[in-house]
Amino acid sequence: MRVIARIAFASVVLGFAGAALAQQPGPSIMYKNLEYRFGIIFPSQAQPMARDVTYTTKDGATVPARQFFIEEGAGRYTVTVVQFESGRAEDRRAVEHAAEVLRRRGEVRFQAYADYDPGIPGRQLNIFEPGGRQLRASVYMYDRRLYITEANAEPGDVAAIQFEQSIMLLDEDGGDVDREGLELVLAFIGSLFGRILP
């Protein structure tokens, strides 16, 4: 499922390349955080701001979390990483609870189970909030870390699509835990460029 989502993302990015370049002053780059073990494409070359927050679990307990965010124009792009000290390394119930909290924010237009890789549970959501804003979000859990991405922007914002779809979960060496999917996506992009470029 994640491989299909990544191939779809690559198609969208290539299809909207002109629009994306018109909207952004410079190329986006992958931000990697080795301590919190994720990578993502923020819609700016600036480093995201970070702050400590608390997260409320399904059982009502509060646990520490770290939030990374950028405000760009009218959009806000956030990654929240919740570190659990105990429990399952990959817990679908924790993923579903985070998705339920997101669903309360508006009208759900799309939602899907979207495992990052087999055994790494995930959800993707597209929600229209009151006032017409669009929330593109994803939730994944890997190695006792819950990752929640939120791109809150105008409907159809290319940077929001790119942000939500670009999340990478990293191993302790900084590599994508979904190596097979990454290699498939890179091969797909290479084949597209091979057809476009002489």
Image (cartoon, rainbow, N blue to C red):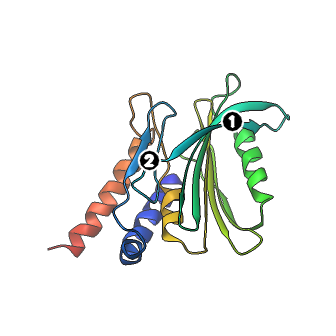
**The label number, if any, that marks residue 47 in the structure image:** 2
Compared to residue 140, the image places residue 73 above or below, namely below
Q: Where 189 falls versus 141 (above or below)?
A: below
Q: Is residue 62 left or right of residue 113?
A: right
Q: Check disc 1: other Cα within 10 Å, few if <14, some if 14-19, many if 20+.
A: many
Outermost residue on the right side: it is: 60
Query: Between tags 2 and 1, which lies in front?
Result: 2
For the residue pair 115 and 68, the one nearer the viewer reads as: 68
Q: Quadrant of residue 111?
A: bottom right
Q: Secondary structure at mark 1?
A: loop
Does residue 125 lie above or below 181 as drawn? below
| Residue in the foreground of this view, choosing between 76 and 93 | 76
Q: Circle 2 sits in a helix, a strand or a loop, which is it?
A: loop
Q: Which residue is mark 1?
A: 91
State yes or no: discs 2 and 1 in contact (Cβ < 8 Å).
Answer: no
Residue 42 position within the rendered picture, expressed as x and y whole percent measured from the top left: 47, 55
Residue under the point 52% across and 33% down: 36
Q: Residue flagged by tag 1: what amino acid is it?
A: Asp
| Residue 66: percent from left, percent from top | 61, 37
Alpha-carbon span between mark 2 and mark 1: 30 Å
Crowding at dot 2, Cα within 10 Å, few <14 / some 14-19 / many 20+, comes out as few
Q: Mark 2 or 1 closer to N-term? A: 2
Relative to 58, is 135 on the left or the right?
Answer: left
Residue type (three-letter) at the residue carrying disc 2: Gln
Is 129 above or below relative to 37? below
Spot occupied by residue 187 in the image (x, y as percentages of width and height) = 30, 57
Q: Residue furthest top?
A: 86
